[in-house]
Image (cartoon, rainbow, N blue to C red):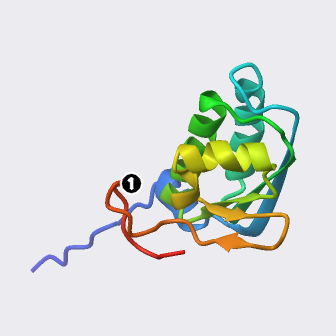
Amino acid sequence: MKSASREVKVDEFSRAAQTTQTVPVVEVQVCGDLDASSAPGVNEVLSEALALHPRQLVIDLAGCDVIDAAGILLLLDAHRRAIREGGMVALRSPSARARRNLKLAKVDRVLQVITPDGDLSLGISHDSEAGFGGVTR
């Protein structure tokens, strides 16, 4: 009787996926307005940061006075990409005006927002209007 042997191949993609390393925290500082004109450049920087597979991506908004709809979409896209890789995004020190825009867009219910006075928003709330469930602030 013949003995059958079976060879299992592990392709390079599978091996790379198993050995992906993560870093604990990557911080990106946004200086100037986060709007339609600056979004492509900021997106490049965020993509480079997310390529490091951080457990937490901190986006420092202390130097950013204005965030428009394009900036908000960019932040939410970064959040989506981070979550997909097992990480999270936190926004640090948004100005009062930026915080107002984030609140109006209900981004403060999705993303962790760390304010200059040390107040911490945990992100997702139970507000059914927002369409999200989870941790309350």
Q: Which residue occupies the foreground of this view, 101 or 64?
A: 101
Q: Which residue occupies the foreground of this view, 24 or 17?
A: 24
Above or below, 52 against 8 in this view is: above
For residue 77, which quarter of the picture?
Answer: top right
Please, what secondary structure does the residue beneath circle 1 have? loop
| Residue 51 in view, yes or no | no
Q: Provide residue 98's location: percent of width, then percent of height.
A: 73, 44
Q: Residue at x 58, y 57 (%)?
A: 108
Q: Left or right: where does residue 62 sit relative to residue 10?
A: right
| Residue 16 in view, yes or no | yes
Above or below, 77 against 28 in this view is: above
Q: Provide residue 115's location: percent of width, then percent of height.
A: 77, 64
Quadrant of the rendering where the N terminus is positioned? bottom left
For residue 16, which quarter of the picture?
Answer: bottom right
| Crowding near the residue tagged with mark 1, few <14, some 14–19, many ≥20 C-alpha atoms within 10 Å | some
Question: Circle 1 sits on which residue?
Answer: 130
Q: Which residue occupies the foreground of this view, 2 or 23?
A: 23
At label 1, the amino acid type is Ala
Q: Residue at x 61, y 38 (%)?
A: 72
Q: Left or right: where does residue 33 sit relative to residue 63?
A: left
Q: Left or right: where does residue 108 sit relative to residue 5?
A: right
Quadrant of the rendering where the C terminus is positioned? bottom right
Q: Residue at x 47, y 58 (%)?
A: 14
Above or below, 137 against 116 in this view is: below
Above or below, 4 against 26 in this view is: below
Q: Provide residue 79's location: percent of width, then percent of height.
A: 57, 52
